[in-house]
Image (cartoon, rainbow, N blue to C red):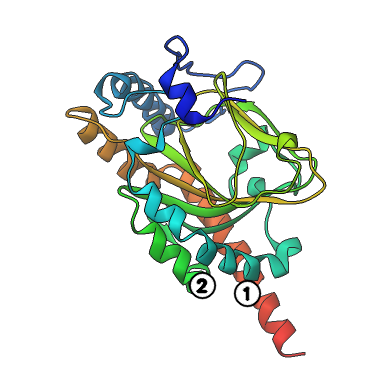
Amino acid sequence: MTSVAERQAHPPPDPTQHFGTEGIKPLARVIFVTRLFMRVVAFVERLNLTCSTVGNPPIYDNAVFPWTKEVEREWRAIRAELDRVLTRQADLPGFHEISADVASISQDGGWKTFLLSGYGFKSQPNIALCPQTWRVCQKIPGLITVMFSILEPGKHLPAHRGPYNGVLRLHLGLIVPEPREQLGIRVDTQLYRWKEGEAVIFDDAYEHEAWNRTAHTRVVLFVDFVKPMRFPGNFLNWLLLHLAVFTPFIREGMDNHKAREKKFYEEAEALRNR
């Protein structure tokens, strides 16, 4: 198994981003404004590939983003807050219960999430429960989304691509069970196996899949941030990301999260008052 550094030193032929994934139907949205928005997104995605200031590899060398060292240094503080969250692991929502579009790749409780922020929305109760995690994430330029991503034993997320290539994704390993050979993520043709305290940055607009074939839960800090670009890509990217909050994709997800968040903390209060 080669490391990210080794892959960067001997890169494979230039990869290609495909704007769709075989075997997974495109999102069926009938609202005209949304269809128009997605056409604009498709145009900007192609522009983003030419405007990127950090290239377009599936998996990045962390040296491209020096701030990853600061995030890695504080992983134990984040892990301590995660441990508190996991005392109610069974009560955490499946990702598909927050984002209905995730149902194309996951329809059970095997992929859970604990969201702190996403696309302008902030979960103040969750941030209050994880203040150190929130503080550390403020070191990340262009921060968009922060959450814990929880992959239960035996869970496999099939090959798919993210909705938009104007953002990059960071995973920071927090709980990585053994044997590590039984879990990992494939991005395009590159394979990465999570390691506790280690960050990996990848472009989820490439086809990717993830799996946990161990007998224990895997958890990473899951962060999306703005991809560095030059003009005019940076301007159009900023515009799209600010408009995204008004689309059904985001609005439905935030409404679902608020409902689940309310239930989560009401149940916690009921337990305290027994």
Q: To which quarter of the image does residue 96 belong?
A: top right
Residue placed at 65% from the left, 77% from the top?
266
Marks 2 and 1 in Cβ contact (< 8 Å): yes
Q: Which residue is mark 2?
A: 125
Residue placed at 43% from the left, 64% from the top?
134
Observer-nearest residue: 39 or 59? 59
Q: Quadrant of the C terminus?
A: bottom right
Observer-nearest residue: 118 or 137? 137
- The tag earlier along the polypeptide, 2 or 1, is 2
- The amino acid sitting under disc 2 is Pro
Up the image or down, 140 lies above or below 235; here it is below
Task: Classify mark 1: residues with Cα within 10 Å, few (<14), some (14-19) or many (20+).
Answer: few
Q: Which residue is mark 1?
A: 265
Up the image or down, 265 lies above or below 226; here it is below
What percent of the width, then of the height, locates residue 185?
Answer: 62, 32
What percent of the width, then of the height, locates residue 92?
Answer: 68, 60
Left or right: residue 110 versus residue 116 is: right
